[in-house]
Amino acid sequence: MSKRVVVGISGGVDSSVAAYLLKNQGYDVTALFMINWHDTTGTLAGDCPWKDDIIFAELTAKKIGIPFHTVDFSEQYRQRVVDYMFSEYEKGRTPNPDVLCNREIKFDLFIKAALEYEADFVATGHYCKKEEFRKDGKTIYRLLAGDDKNKEQSYFLCQLSQEQLKLALFPVGHLNKTEVRKIAREQKLSTAEKKDSQGICFVGKVDLPAFLQQKLESRTGDIIEIPGNLTIYTDYKKISEDGDLSTARLKEVTQCFSYSQSDGMVVGKHQGSHYFTIGQNKGLNIGGRPEQSFVIALDVKNNIVYTGQGQNHPGLYRKGLFIPVKDIHWLRKDLKLKPGESKSYHARIRYRQPLQEATLFMKEEGLYIVFNKLQRGITSGQFAAWYDGNELVGSGVIY
């Protein structure tokens, strides 16, 4: 008897081809479409993705010859993903809803729904791969980078657990996007030429301030420009040579720079510091400066946006970051660092960022990640993920 796989079919080409490949490999395949968002407040005109996507998804299932079902997680999505977003932005942090969506919806609620269809596995169209091996009598599952370096999506799955990964299949992880579209064309799937979705997972393209204004009120505040010579880095190379890698010294290296009103001058007004993120230059509406202005720090308590001029303003860069104990997640728990231990890994702080050489230092209060090179736009609330070769080992929310 063939294994049953429930595919999270989204109405896009990747999940469509994933479903086709599984059917072609002899699996008993069922398509399940998730409806996760109804509210169009704040979305760009004409952008209500699921109403179009469900048509493509159903046409694909019919073409492949597999059962098609829908499930509505909109209330849970609002509670677990959207409300979390509002809460983080209100604190001046920048969340990643796609990572949350995968952890809370696609690989939690969706798995539970798939099990009602007696699924042995669940599958998605993510560009990543899975392997397994035995260690100390247990099966260990590895999350690996997809072969298409332009579409590689393991970062979005950085919060998965061994239990979730055990049930997951990634049928397109060994393919590149061109090959996926070629298969879709050959099989005459309706999604073959459909553009990739953009914007917030399941919500679509949004006018972020308008979207956030559903719960976060506008508040006029100052934009203060900070001169570049006020930001001074602690010399990590020197303290590592001295052998002083105490918690205090690591804090110096990885600290987020903070400024006061007296450090700079007012150059404009904004409608709410919680609408901005580190590294942003759009929406500032600052004129008359010699170079472009970028957000380098936020003070939501006093409703101040701090900016600096130019792509190379020192305030845009940091040597490292900190992740509190409660926010550290090891997908490979067998590789978990103990307090006092350190290890070199490659890490990234955002999707599509090339992997960066870094050293992880585990302390009682949390994990310090120190990069070999300065990193632009390290942002509180985002996820840092670390890799051993092409395997994602762990992740955490940047403090």
Image (cartoon, helix red, strand yellow):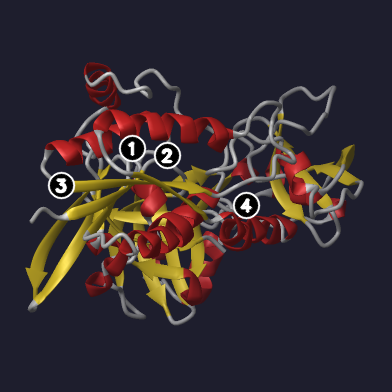
Vertical relation: 124 (above or below) 140: above
210 or 328: nearer the viewer: 210
For the residues marked 1 and 3, what is the alpha-carbon distance in whole angstroms?
15 Å
- Cβ–Cβ under 8 Å for marks 2 and 3: no
Q: Earlier in the sequence, mark 1 or mark 2?
A: 2
390 or 54: nearer the viewer: 54
For label 2, the crowd category at 10 Å Cα-Cα, with few meaning under 14, some 14 to 19 and many 20 or more, is: many
Mark 3 element type: loop
Residue 346 placed where, x, y %?
A: 31, 51
- Cβ–Cβ under 8 Å for marks 1 and 3: no
Name the residue: 29% across, 22% down.
181
For the residues marked 2 and 3, what is the alpha-carbon distance in whole angstroms?
19 Å
Q: Which residue is mark 2?
A: 10
- Cβ–Cβ under 8 Å for marks 1 and 2: yes
Is there any visible trace of residue 10 in the rendered image? yes
Q: Which mark is residue 329?
A: none
Which amino acid type corresponds to the residue marked 1 in the rendered image?
Ser
For label 1, the crowd category at 10 Å Cα-Cα, with few meaning under 14, some 14 to 19 and many 20 or more, is: many
Q: Earlier in the sequence, mark 4 or mark 2?
A: 2
Mark 1 element type: helix
| Quarter the C terminus occupies | bottom right
Name the residue: 49% across, 70% down.
327
Q: Which residue is mark 4?
A: 94
For label 4, the crowd category at 10 Å Cα-Cα, with few meaning under 14, some 14 to 19 and many 20 or more, is: many
Q: Earlier in the sequence, mark 4 or mark 1?
A: 1
Q: Earlier in the sequence, mark 2 or mark 3?
A: 2
Which amino acid type corresponds to the residue marked 4 in the rendered image?
Thr
Name the residue: 41% across, 49% down.
156
Q: Which residue is mark 1?
A: 15
Q: Which residue is mark 3?
A: 27
